[in-house]
Amino acid sequence: MRASSVVLLPHAPSSVAVARRRLSSELADSGVFQTIVDDAAVILSELISNALRHARPLPSGQVKVRWQRHDDGVLELEVSDGGAMTEPRRGPGTLSSLGGRGLGIVETLSDGWGVRHDECGTTVWAVLRAPRTSDDEEAGVPSDAQAPVPDLSEFPDLLDEPDDELEARTPSRARPA
């Protein structure tokens, strides 16, 4: 079973909870492990919060939220907005700062993230492995076994060679395209 949705939400703080609840419900209903559901909900919350804080809404006055769990177990999360004057990037997130940790959290919980631009605005995306509990039960895999590694070749940003100078400053699994 695939879990996927596209949701247009108001460019308002209340949208974070709405999207998080819907994503969590759909992933849980499709049999995704609860720990992955929780990680995906945090990632989506951070992406939406960043869009609301730093970007303009889409021309419709909304943000677009999309998620899709593929048959190979890869879960894509995307938040599209009307763009901003700055590029989404991971901030330093010091202990005393009030912000700047969001994309660092996304980076930690996901297998990679990046940014795409088009004529309508900016999309920040993240991918993570989201095996279903029933996949393992049907295959007779013990509950303590490692999840299968999905084919991430569809996400070329994850496979790019890192820039040594950038890598020295900010370790990352993926760089915006």
Image: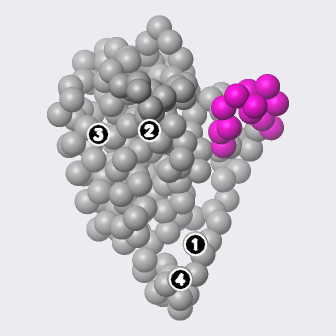
Image x and y of residue 133, in percent: 43, 77
Q: Earlier in the sequence, mark 2 or mark 4?
A: 2
Mark toward the viewer: 1 or 4? 4
Q: CA distance from mark 1 to mark 4?
A: 9 Å
Which disc number belongs to residue 168? none
Question: In the figure, residue 48 lies in which quadrant?
Answer: top left
Quarter of the picture containing the N terminus is bottom left
Q: Earlier in the sequence, mark 3 or mark 4?
A: 3
Return the residue at label 4: 144
Image x and y of residue 123, in percent: 47, 28
Residue 177 visible in the snapshot: yes
**Which segment is the magenta one?**
161-173
Mark 1 touches mark 4? (CB < 8 Å): no
Mark toward the viewer: 2 or 4? 4
Q: Earlier in the sequence, mark 3 or mark 2?
A: 3
- The three-letter code of the residue at mark 3 reads Val
Crowdedness near tag 3: few (<14), some (14–19) or many (≥20) residues, C-alpha within 10 Å: some
Q: CA distance from mark 2 to mark 1?
A: 23 Å
Q: CA distance from mark 3 to mark 4?
A: 35 Å
- The three-letter code of the residue at mark 4 reads Asp
Q: Earlier in the sequence, mark 1 or mark 3?
A: 3
Which disc number belongs to residue 7? 3
**Helix, strand or loop under label 1:** loop
Q: Residue furthest bottom?
A: 140
Mark toward the viewer: 3 or 4? 4
Return the residue at label 2: 78
Q: CA distance from mark 2 to mark 4?
A: 30 Å
Return the residue at label 1: 147
Residue 98 left/right relative to 157: left
